[in-house]
Structure formats: structure tokens, C-alpha cells
Image (cartoon, rainbow, N blue to C red):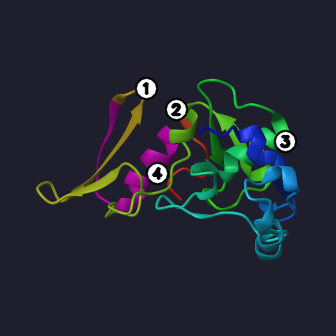
Amino acid sequence: MSISSSYVICLLRYDPSDGAMYWKTRQSHQVNCPEMLDNWNRRYADKRAGSSNSDGYEVIRVGGNQFRTNRLVWELLHGPIPDGMQIDHVNGDRRDNRAANLRAVTITENNRNMRLSHRNTSGLHGVVFLHRYNRFQAHIVVDRKHIYLGYHKTLIDAAAARKSAEFRHGFHPNHGR
């Protein structure tokens, strides 16, 4: 059974101060088993809804379906998410669903506000140390094209080249945090 996000939203209350969704008290017409209604309300009503999934996003499960909280909050406040758009967390915290922290962006814009990969060894997006040359190499990917920004003696020089390129190509200031 497919459940719509608009139905899930009517089961929840949004608190703008912390960006969290809380379960509303359910009525008898909202449950499959009316004799379990009191038990459900005692256990869940007015409690925070959702948990973190394996990717770190807060999700809410209803009827075997899973909904990302950031998308539910966006739809509650702004209506349906436009086709081809994603909901980005501006500060990079996937559990921070305050309205000021959410924005609808394209895939490209979302990728320009990425956190640093856990596999990164230099501590900076697009900077790698090449032992062969004993230099840092900086590069950036823009519109699926790799742009090499040269070899640099120091990490600071490579970081400056990368940040300058990010600014020129419209990357979000939080990119690589």
C-alpha cells in the first residue's frame, strides 16, 4: 500500500524552533485497529517522530513506507518539491530540519555543497598529495569536466587554488566542511 507524503504530514506536528516533527494524537478513523488507539496515543502522541537511517538522514516510517523528514518539512512549508529538485541542508547537518536550513536545489547545486568524504586524506576537497612529485595537486570538477589547478609545493597554496576555483564556479561557501 502506497502512502502519500501529504497523508503522513497530516499525522505530524512541526516545531520550527528545533526543526523536529512530532506525532499528533490519532483519532479512531486514522488507525486500522481501534482497540489499539489508546495504546498508540499513550506510547507515541506528542513524542518526536523519526530516527536516523544509515546515511544519517532523519526518516519517518508510516505503514511500511519511509519518508525523509527534510522532504516532509519542505512540503509542509512550501508545497510539493519541484521536479528535478532536491532538498539540501545548508549547514550539512542531515538531522537539522529547521526551515532556515533547508533549500530546494538542483543536483548540481546540491553537489556544490557536499561535506568532505571520509576517505579524503588531505583534509580538503580536490587536493591530493602526489608522492611521486612531492607536490600537492589541486583540481575541481565542473559540469562533469575535470579542471586541473596545478601542482603546489604546500598544502596552503593548493588549498588557495581550490578555494579560488570554487568561488569562480559558484560553489557554496560550506562546500567541503
Q: Mark 1 and 4 residues: CB-CB less than 8 Å, in contact?
A: no
Under mark 1, the amino acid is Asp
Residue 108: mark: 2
Farthest residue, direction front: 35
Q: Residue drawn at (34%, 60%), measured in percent from left and top?
A: 120
First of labels 2, 1 by sequence position: 2
Position of residue 114 measured from the top left corner of the image (x, y, whole percent): 51, 49
Numbered disc 1: secondary structure: loop
Q: Earlier in the sequence, mark 2 or mark 4?
A: 2
Q: Amino acid at mark 2?
A: Thr
Between 145 and 108, the one nearer to me in the picture: 108
Q: Are marks 2 and 1 in contact (CB under 8 Å)?
A: yes
Q: Is residue 142 left or right of residue 33?
A: left
Q: Does the stretch in magenta take in 22?
A: no
Where's residue 136, x and y in %?
Answer: 28, 55
Give the residue type at disc 3.
Leu
Which residue position holds label 4?
160
In the depicted view, which residue is nearer to us: 152 or 139?
A: 139
> Of discs 2 and 1, which sits in the foreground?
2
Circle 3: element type: helix
Residue 19 seen in render: no
